[in-house]
Image (cartoon, helix red, strand yellow):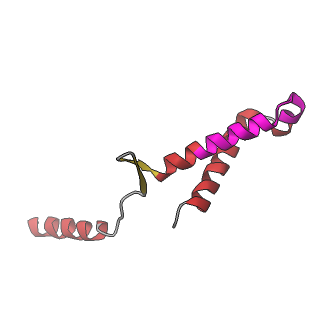
């Protein structure tokens, strides 16, 4: 029985060696994940869109805002990830 457990442990370790660490950027000596920068870019892009649509009539284009603002933030974040970070 112990040999079977050892074999399973070794095979698991062998299969997990192909995993790479999460992509990250070093800023001022600290590593931050790429998705965090993409999320900040998505929020900044959504704030810019919100400021461009100053009047309530224009903001009505994005109704209901409870659904469209998070969706647009996610879209901008994913586009930032796709266009800025290498794959």
Report the span colored magenta.
Answer: 41-60
Q: Residue furthest right?
A: 57
Q: Position of residue 39 (x, y in %)?
A: 56, 45
23 on left or right of 55: left
Front-lying residue, 25 or 57: 25
Q: Position of residue 46 (x, y in %)?
A: 69, 40
For this view, does 19 lie left or right of residue 45?
left
User: Residue 33 in magenta?
Assistant: no
In the image: residue 79, left or right of residue 59: left
The percent position of residue 32, horizontal first and vertical second, equals 42, 47
Q: Main secondary structure of the magenta part?
A: helix
| Residue at x 61%, y 54% (from the top left corner) | 80
Q: Quarter-wise, where is residue 4 in the image?
A: bottom left
Residues 8 and 13: in front is 13
Q: Nearer the viewer, residue 82 or 66?
A: 82
The reply to whether the magenta stretch includes residue 43 is yes
């Amino acid at each position: 029985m112990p040999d079977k457990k050892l074999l399973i442990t070794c095979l698991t370790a062998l299969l997990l060696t192909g995993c790479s660490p999460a992509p990250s950027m070093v800023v001022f000596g600290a590593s931050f994940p790429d998705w965090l920068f993409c999320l900040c870019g998505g929020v900044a892009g959504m704030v810019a869109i919100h400021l461009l649509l100053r009047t309530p009539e224009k903001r009505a284009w994005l109704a209901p805002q409870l659904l469209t603002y998070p969706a647009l933030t996610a879209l901008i974040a994913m586009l930032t990830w796709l266009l800025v970070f290498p794959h």
